[in-house]
Image (tube, rainbow, N blue to C red):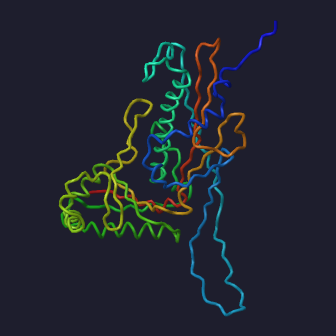
Amino acid sequence: MAFESIDPFVANGFTMRTMSNAIVEMPLQWGILQQLGIFRPMPIRTRTVGIQREAYSLALLPFKDVGSPGTPGKTGSRDLVPVTVPHIPHDDFVHPDDVANLRDENGELMALSRFIALKLQTMSGKHDITIEHLMAGAIQGKIYDADGTLKYDLFSILGRTQSVIDFPFSVSTTNVRSKILDAKIAMEEALGGEVFTSYLGLCGATWFKTFIDHQDVKTRYENWQSNAELRRDNRTGFDFVDVFWQMYRAHAPKPDGTDLVFLPDTEAVLIPVGTMNTFDFYMSPADMNPYVNTLGQRVYASIEPADHQRGWNIHTQSNPLPFCKRPQCLIRLTMS
């Protein structure tokens, strides 16, 4: 008698593409920078992205008589810098005992698909916070690995330097507004004509608290908001000198268990929001058979039975590279 084998994974929708689509569609669980939409999604088909390094800025065009030749374009010096997109795999395992006799919120025996979905949600969250960490590095010009090792120095890669502006908060007479204007001017000059819609100041906890407590800020802030507003929790941010200032206290444990703070407590960074060609989020395809030479997506997932049908192996991966192509526009703000 012939025996017909049925693949339970295909039958239950556990194909690689279905799993990958499911994890992509999960709501973003962690990531202020991802929610702000600073980085433009850029799916690519390769494991390496070429970043063009060039001396470029917009220039005014002069008037010409009708019928005269146009002003010739000038090509500045440029070269292409290859940058490898990080590969971030994450695996987990489901044992039959993890699901056996487990009941859902309705008291019913939990289906395998439901348990796998919960497992994927946790794994997706780890990718979310990892991508957020990479983006936090990119807006500061230096991207670090999970253990704190520097992987990409954007200033070195593109041959640029960063402007650093110190805020002497310890001096009561410091004109904070003037220091902010200095930072805005430095950012605008560094953009070289690139358009943007607004200014964003992301602040470490100590920098932010010292900033809003400084007499110059308090006095000006009182003229802009009511006393009732002053008593609320301002960590969510407020506008001052046409900059939206927000406390950014992102942190996560490193592989050794110690805490990694994404933005130093005593620093802030001023960045442009709404640019067209400054912040990109490159996504490479997974190193899986169905995705060779396809456009990358934010995260991938697959599942397969373990040896002797004793559980299920779950594999997820992301291949993300958030990149600032004009790191000189990232103005570092210190305090003294």
- Answer left or right for 239 relative to 106: left
Rendering coords of residue 235 (x, y %): 29, 51
Residue drawn at the location 24% of the way across and 55% of the way down: 210
For the C terminus, the quadrant is bottom left
- Answer left or right for 95 relative to 18: left
Determine the image quadrant of residue 245.
bottom left
Rendering coords of residue 251 (x, y %): 38, 41
Residue sitting farthest toward the right:
1
Residue drawn at the location 46% of the way across and 50% of the way down: 35
- Answer left or right for 21 relative to 28: right
Q: Which of 49 and 288 is in front in this view?
A: 288
Residue sitting farthest toward the bottom:
65
Q: Which of 250 and 103 is in front in this view?
A: 103
For the N terminus, the quadrant is top right
- Answer left or right for 287 relative to 198: right
Rendering coords of residue 307 (x, y %): 64, 14
Above or below, 129 relative to 231: above
Residue sitting farthest toward the top:
1
Residue drawn at the location 51% of the way across and 35% of the way down: 124
Determine the image quadrant of residue 170.
bottom left
Number of callouts: 0
Q: Nearer the viewer, residue 292 or 305?
A: 305
Rendering coords of residue 20 (x, y %): 61, 35
Residue drawn at the location 40% of the way across and 45% of the way down: 262
Q: Nearer the viewer, residue 322 or 21?
A: 21
